[in-house]
Amino acid sequence: MSHKISAAVLRNLSSPFLPESLRLEDPGDDEILVKIAGTGICHTDIKVSGGYAGVPLPVVLGHEGAGVVAQVGKHVTSVVPGDHVLLTFDSCGKCPQCSTQHPAYCDEGQRLSFACQHSEKGASLASSGELVNGNFFGQSSFASHAVTNERNTVKVDKSLPLEILGPLGCGFQTGAGVVLNVLQPSAGQSFAIFGAGNVGLSAVMAAAIAGMDPLIVLDVNPHRLEIARTLGASHTIDLGKETDPVKLIQQITNKAGVNYSLDTTNKSEVIRQAFESLANRGTCIHSGGGGKDLTFPGSLLLHGRTVQGVIQGDSDPQVFIPQLLNYYGDGKFPFDKLLSFYPLADINRAVAEMVSGQVIKPVLLM
Ligand SMILES: [Zn+2]
Ligand SMILES: [Zn+2]
């Protein structure tokens, strides 16, 4: 059997998403059909729509979905129809990274995220006989329905507002995971976060949970710096006005530099500033998208400093998403304050308002 669904289809690179009706085949034996309630838009969707990672066209993107299980394949045991679920990145479950609870670094991750091909027996998308590529990040959730598998489907409590949860599966777990999974700081350690988008602000919330201090946030957008203060930042630096952020961070930390810094901008000069802001034996995390050659002063690197790349906050989603939901329930991770909602048909307006910096995290409602 196949299901009639609505989806936003990307037919050409760097062109608008087109709302279309498609046919989606039944899930395969290991797959799950999810009726989507809401899907966040991530900067990776936008980069991919411009040609990054070379996904095949036409394609349905979207990788921050949440919804209700509608149908399961015969081998699926972790969820049943009617369960509420949040979707995240896919992983193989068998490689050395997955076997040691680091699925964000799955050796098959690049293929599972970007090849956009369903398994032989799995569901496929079609538009009047023509194949439309799906399975982006194991979901393709810019659509009323998506097919997933058990590894990237996290069951959530039915009392939670389902339509807001999707962004936890990528953007918010990325920033929060940098702090809570990777850095695991002690209270009172210092932190500078470059870029106050959804990744930077989720790192702010997690750093406040960990008691990091001073907690310094840098951005060119004064409104975002205000939000950072409401979420726990002790200091903010407006990069639209200040030309020497490294010097200001030295002043705030009594010339020591920060124990940890995070770049979310993916700009080479900003990553260098994040590195130069470190104290001896400090760690600079690069989680801004990658792909560029970076340079650092070797004299600084020598003093025990580390530069580390992090994907998806090194999260094991089946463990970390429930933790974040507990913090949300306790009022310590108020990610819902950062969301703006749009109907699926307004996806292009949502993308434009995200790119312009007008909104932090757009969520498409199905
Ligand atoms: Zn993402
Ligand atoms: Zn793997």
Image (tube, helix red, strand yellow):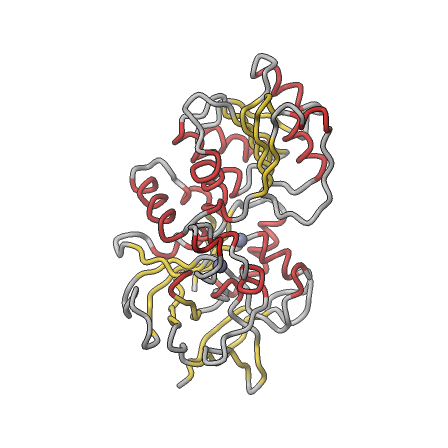
Vertical comparison of 11 with 207: above or below: below
- Look at 57% across and 26% down and name the residue there: 282
Depicted 206 relative to depicted 130: above or below:
above
* Left or right side of 100 for 245: right
| Left or right relative to 160: residue 139 | right
Residue situated furthest front in the rendering: 96
| Position of residue 172 measured from the top left corner of the image (x, y, whole percent) | 46, 45
Q: Position of residue 251 (x, y in %)?
A: 61, 14
Residue shown at 46% from the left, 43% from the top: 338
List x then y, in percent, for residue 345.
52, 65
Please name the residue shown 41% across and 67% down the image. Answer: 149
Q: x%, y% of residue 101?
A: 42, 50
Q: Residue furthest top?
A: 254
Tell me if residue 56 comes above or below residue 305 in the rendering.
below
Numbered marks: total = 0
Quarter-wise, where is residue 145 in the image?
bottom left
